[in-house]
Image (cartoon, rainbow, N blue to C red):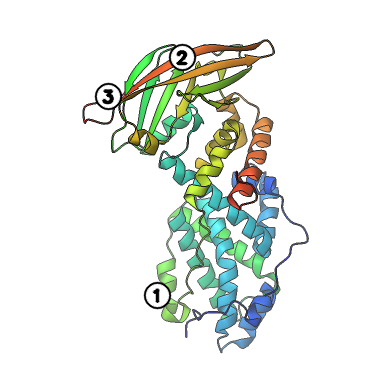
Amino acid sequence: MPYASKVPEHSSETALDDATLARRIAQTAPGIDSMAETELYRRLAPRVRLYGLKHLRNESAAADLVQQVLLTTIERLRAGRLREPEQIGSYVLGMCRMVVLDLRRGHVRRERLLETYGEGLAPADMPEPLVLNSARLQRCLEHLSVRECTVLVMSFYDDMPSDEVGNELGLTAANIRVIRHRGLERLRDCVTGKELS
Amino acid sequence: MIRPTCSAPVGLARLVEYWLAELDAATEARIEEHLFGCGVCSRKLEELAALATGIHQLVRQGAVHTVLTSAFVRRLTEQGLRVREYNVPHNGSVDCTVAPEDDMVVARLQAPLQGIERLDLVEGEARERLYDIPFNAKHGEVVVTPRVEELRKLPASTLRMRLVAVDASGERVIGEYTFHHTPYSGRSSTT
């Protein structure tokens, strides 16, 4: 039985912490607590995806990471092989680190995992990543000072650290960090509607 | 639904340093540990990642009117972006256009920048002014990116840009640049 069933937004599972959900999954085995599994997946998938994006800098590799890490995690919880469910966050982080190392080495284990567990571990849909309104973001970027806009574009287009941006613009890294922070705060306020003229 | 809370939130500046790999390994590991156990902070990081993705996409569409650097533009071309570049001599002019396949257009304004404290860019007949633009005096140029979609809509026309140095004694024009724009005809070249 898959754990892909929908958890209603106001279900009791949404009020539980991660550890309680993990414990419920472990204690229900060999039965399956699909509501707890889905809710845990819904929470952890964005965190694993962000870890993947940061370390792999690739959206589809990050999506693979989510599948591989969370399939393994749920499988281990079901099998009672995760000794301290209250450490679920640390466990998933450790698993992410391991899988990223593997992915970098070119080992692909996802297919093996899917072959082994098949439909029984078919994951819930990946929660949709947050996507901003592009036209609004464009307006907000140009609403900033040119200096802020330039620094944000150079910093975030290719994830360039402050010392490199500063080197190109003839400014210190500390100066870039100040401009970057001020610009980002203003951009965020504008995009979320707190500031837009 | 219970709204999740965080007793030790990671600040936005710290999250940016984390995202841009500016932290030492131990601090990065501590933040990661926190993020995996905290829905509030991981949500904040997700917002930051969405901003980064959005900026990346806008740049690739040539949709951001700003000032960049030559090195940055070079990286864009190395990544496969079709960038139409115009080197405009100091107080000079160029014939220019934008082709359907261009992702971005760049004007490299040559200028003597040594000793200048603040630089403004004044554009067009409407004299739209960009204040305190970033520049590296060593490079002797200012790299301007207009919005490609706006260029595509332009009829044949002449556009002007001015670089204005500003200091305590006032302002002075240090360079004037003229662009003779024509809509794409299929026979054009960059300079």
Q: Report the chain holding disc 1.
A: A
The answer, for residue A79, to whether it is visible in the render is no
Label ID, residue A8: none
* Residue B99 place in picture, x, y as percent: 29, 34
- Work out which quarter of the rendered image holds the N terminus of chain B and state it: bottom right
Q: Residue furthest right?
A: B7
- Which quadrant is home to the C terminus of chain B? top left
Q: Chain of mark 3?
A: B
Q: Nearer the viewer, mark 3 or mark 2?
A: 2
Residue behind mark 3 = B189
Which residue is depicted at the point 60% across and 25% down? B132
The mark lying in front, picked from 3 and 1, is: 3
**Residue type marked 2:** Glu
Query: Is A146 in front, or is A151?
Result: A146
Residue farthest to the front, as pictured: B126
Question: Toward the viewer: B103 or A78?
Answer: B103
Q: Position of residue B26 (x, y in %)?
A: 70, 49
Cα separation between marks 3 and 1: 55 Å
Please state which amino acid type lies under the numbered disc 1. Answer: Glu
Q: Which residue position is annotated with label 1?
A: A115
From what the image shows, is residue B56 above or below residue B154?
A: below
- Kind of residue indicated by mark 3: Ser
Residue at 66% in and 14% down: B167
Task: Say which residue appears at 40% left-offset and 42% top-offset.
Answer: B61
Q: Label 1: few (<14), some or many (≥20) within 10 Å?
A: few
Describe the element under mark 3 as helix, strand or loop. Answer: loop
Q: Which residue is mark 2?
A: B176
Look at the numbered disc 1 and give the secondary structure of its residue.
helix
Task: Decide if residue B158 is on the left or right side of residue B113.
Answer: left
